[in-house]
Amino acid sequence: MNIAALQNPNATPAEALAASLGILGGAAGTLAGLIPPAAMLTPQGAAIKTALTGIAIAASAAQLGIQQNLGTVNELINDLARNWNSLLNDLGDFFGDLFNRAKSWTWPRDPIILDLDGDGLETVGLNANIHFDHDGDGVLTKTGWAGKDDALLVWDRNANGTIDTGAELFGDFTPLPNGTLAPNGFAALAALDSNGDGILDASDPAFAELKLWRDASQDGQTGNGELISLADAGIVSLNLANTLKNQNLANGNQLTREGTFTRADSTTSAMGEFKLATDTFDTKFANEIEVPETLKTLPTMGGTGNVRELQQAAAQSGSVAGVLAQFQGATTRAEQKALLDSLITAWAETSGMARSLEARAAGKCLYGCDVGDANDKTWRAAA
């Protein structure tokens, strides 16, 4: 009866659906019946038998429900069909938006900023063209930043008079006493609260080490007079109690948490933890590589991300220098084009980033199948 209903050109969508469910239920029940009793099976086999039996029961129940309510179900299906294209378009837009967000997502950084002038916490976005080495890898990433009237809370840990990396801010790259990194800025501050009273002040030894970085030049570099002590700023305490905000700002930054600090005159102002927007494609390097005179005649172009400008990459890598020299010496476009893959590969390898699944998964257990065998559909631990 199920096959006949499917073959009937005059069958309604509901009748066809009921027939399909009947076939599904019958097939699942048949497969379940072919499997030996659960007592003879491994736990995985027993689970499969149970699942097939469940599918058979559910499909049969659904078929019965549809057959008993053909008119209502048919109306629902027809309504779905009328709106199907609109639904597909909406789903396409939804998943397209998710894909674009995932494609452009970068890890935000979350330092603590103090409202020094009392007019509210202020930040600037990526269009301010500020670069800073948040994660200490020697690469300065384009980043959102504190506005020039407010200040970043910092600790010049190496006492060199400058704030070099995110380890000297208070955020997700701040080292904790136990050797791990802080999950966020307020957690990093809490680790310095020696008496556990929820306030950082003169009674906590680390309080005297903290400074404010008011980046008046807005260049991500510590200029003369930009580092000031909390005492010179008239700040007597930092209050660790905070409120979760997760407020997205128009410039791409996000205020995640907000607390307060107290001045010597007992007034308070806001102290906020921000997830600053970052652009890992737009970078600079903390240490430029000197290009030898012998390489300065070679072709060059700018680098991005963790890849340096081409002549600097040639100074880093003999492979890049060799292929680049061949490229320069080629006399035809076809010869140069044939060298491009080798040149790009050698250039990319200077980034130091893992470029294969095998390299990234070193020391980890992988599961997969033999891609060279079209009939191998099994999943197993890799060697």
Image: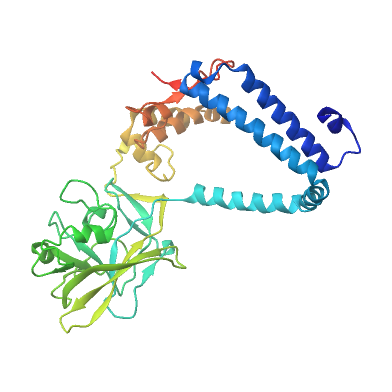
Q: Residue at x 76, y 51 (%)?
A: 80
Q: Nearer the viewer, residue 70 or 16?
A: 70
Task: From the top left corner, tell me how far across and down residue 115 is, in percent.
Answer: 29, 74
Question: How is the protein colored in the picture?
Answer: rainbow
Q: Quadrant of residue 3?
A: top right
283 over 58 or under it: above or below: below
165 over 112 or under it: above or below: above
Q: In the picture, which quadrant includes the N terminus?
A: top right
Residue 149 visible in the picture: yes
Q: Quadrant of residue 189?
A: bottom left
40 over 47 or under it: above or below: above
Task: From the top left corner, tell me how far across and down residue 48 is, in percent.
Answer: 55, 25
Task: From the top left corner, tell me how far across and down residue 272 is, in percent.
Answer: 31, 68
Q: Residue at x 22, y 83 (%)?
A: 267
Residue 41 visible in the picture: no
Q: Nearer the viewer, residue 136 or 320?
A: 136
**Residue sitting farthest toward the bottom:** 265
Q: Residue at x 78, y 38 (%)?
A: 17
Q: Quadrant of residue 278?
A: bottom left
Count how many numbered circles sit on residues in the image.
0
92 over 150 or under it: above or below: above
Q: Residue at x 81, y 37 (%)?
A: 16
Task: From the top left corner, tell me how far across and down residue 383 is, in percent.
Answer: 38, 18
**Residue sitting farthest toward the right:** 10
Residue 313 lies left or right of residue 237; in this view the side is right
Q: Nearer the viewer, residue 27 or 178?
A: 27
